[in-house]
Amino acid sequence: MSHRLTQAQLDAHWMAYTGNRQFKKDPRIITSAAGNYYTDSDGRKIFDGLSGLWTCGLGHSVPAINEAVAQQVKTLDYSPAFQFGHEKSFLLAEQITEFMPAGLNRIFFTGSGSESVDTALKVARAYWRKKGMGTKTKFIGRAKGYHGAGISGFSVGGIPANRTLYGQGLESYHLPHTQVPGSEFSKGMAEQGKERADDLLNLIMMHDASNIAAVIVEPMSGSAGVIVPPQGYLQRLREICDQHNILLIFDEVITAFGRMGAKTGAEAFGVTPDVITMAKQVTNGVIPMGAVAFKQEIYDTFMDNGGAEYMLEIPHGYTYSAHPIACAAGLASLAEIKKQGLIERVSSMSPAWENSVHQLKDASSMITDIRNYGFAAGITIAPIDGEPAKRPFQIAMAMWDKGYYVRYGADTIQLAPPFTTEQSEIDSLINALGETIKQQS
């Protein structure tokens, strides 16, 4: 591969979520991006089959975002995040509320999805203390859930590979995942699995609602391989949380701002949580940024019990909360989503995407399940004994060689093309993937 990096330079970077030893023997270096394609160091065009890391639904190098960022750098590169403000953070907060379900209208800015989750969990605990219920400190996540890389995120997360190395985290318990026998190859929401929401009742019985602060789930689990909620499942979680005075948090770092063919996963699946975490698509991946949307009553609880007016209502935040350049990128990104009608486009093209993805069912007996919703799909690959991640890795590397970037994780291949993808690009991606899986067989 043609690149100018020395071995010492390659070795200096301890890469995130990467097999560093393998990568540094055979680096895959991206040099530029435009539209729906990357260019690698050999000059090859690579179709972006995961929208960056679920981040770039608008595609890459979007002129309106580039211009907004360039102008902001010239005008205000940074301003203090504490005790002082700049106009764009307030403008962006209001814009975000237009994408949120009614009532989730107070926006707290962070620097990433992991920080958004940490913020949501901290606020949940503090909220109950403000309400005089300080024993409500425990959290309930879900098996196969992913909530970022922070200590709170891995605690409530349920992907074993992300947890076992690090020892004890926050006191958290986990619902079972919703991939049940008989739900394989479901198109959209499966009919089976709703009953797994009732496992929450067992956890409440064991730990008592007086000790549980919040339940946190992804409306659709992305990093575990596009696990779509069964029909009625999220509604049942909402009912149980309401009955037992427990906050419901939706981690929408992947699902917010269009991926589901709706403004949020909450809208797509018809359930309104108390809190929504977000990141990624808010700036189209151009600049790191995250945010958390809280319902009015949570915000008011802090304002009404904040002490003297000059005092901090909540001692929490980040150096890069509401960064001016990130806010400029966010405003431009959300404006482009609306201007180009991309949420509606994803919704209208989702049936064709679904049909194309499910054509892979007959490509190989190695494919044991296919799941999809909106512009996302997960394909489960039968494991090699003792090496469940090997075949997906081999498939992803073969796809890269053919000019397609797809994500591999555990026993799955994950797809999430840009919202701007054409049918011809979908056909090309799926045909190449089917061919590659057959070759690996």
Image (cartoon, rainbow, N blue to C red):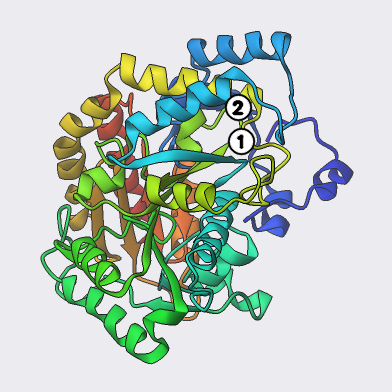
Q: In the displayed orientation, state which residue is furthest to the left.
A: 191
Q: Which residue is mark 1?
A: 288
What's the amino acid at mark 1? Pro
What's the amino acid at mark 2? Ala
Task: Using the image as rendered, state which of residue 381 and residue 110 is in the foreground.
Answer: 110
Q: Which residue is mark 2?
A: 326
Q: Nearer the viewer, mark 2 or mark 1?
A: 2
Q: Are marks 2 and 1 in contact (CB under 8 Å)?
A: yes
Q: In the displayed orientation, state which residue is furthest to the right.
A: 8
Task: Using the image as rendered, state which of residue 182 and residue 438 is in the foreground.
Answer: 182
- Residue at x-position 45% and y-position 39%: 106
Q: Of helix, strand and loop, which one carries label 1?
A: loop
Estimate the x, y position of residue 392 in percent, counting from the top left.
Answer: 44, 59
- Residue at x-position 29% and y-position 35%: 263
Q: How many marks?
A: 2
Estimate the x, y position of residue 439 in percent, counting from the top left.
Answer: 36, 54
> Earlier along the polypeptide chain: callout 2 or callout 1?
1
Q: In the displayed orientation, state which residue is furthest to the front.
A: 308
In the rendered image of this protein, does residue 264 appear above or below residue 315?
Answer: above
What separation in Å lies between label 2 and label 1 (alpha carbons)? 7 Å
- Residue at x-position 72% and y-position 58%: 21
Residue 176 can be seen in this image: yes
Q: Of helix, strand and loop, which one carries label 2?
A: helix
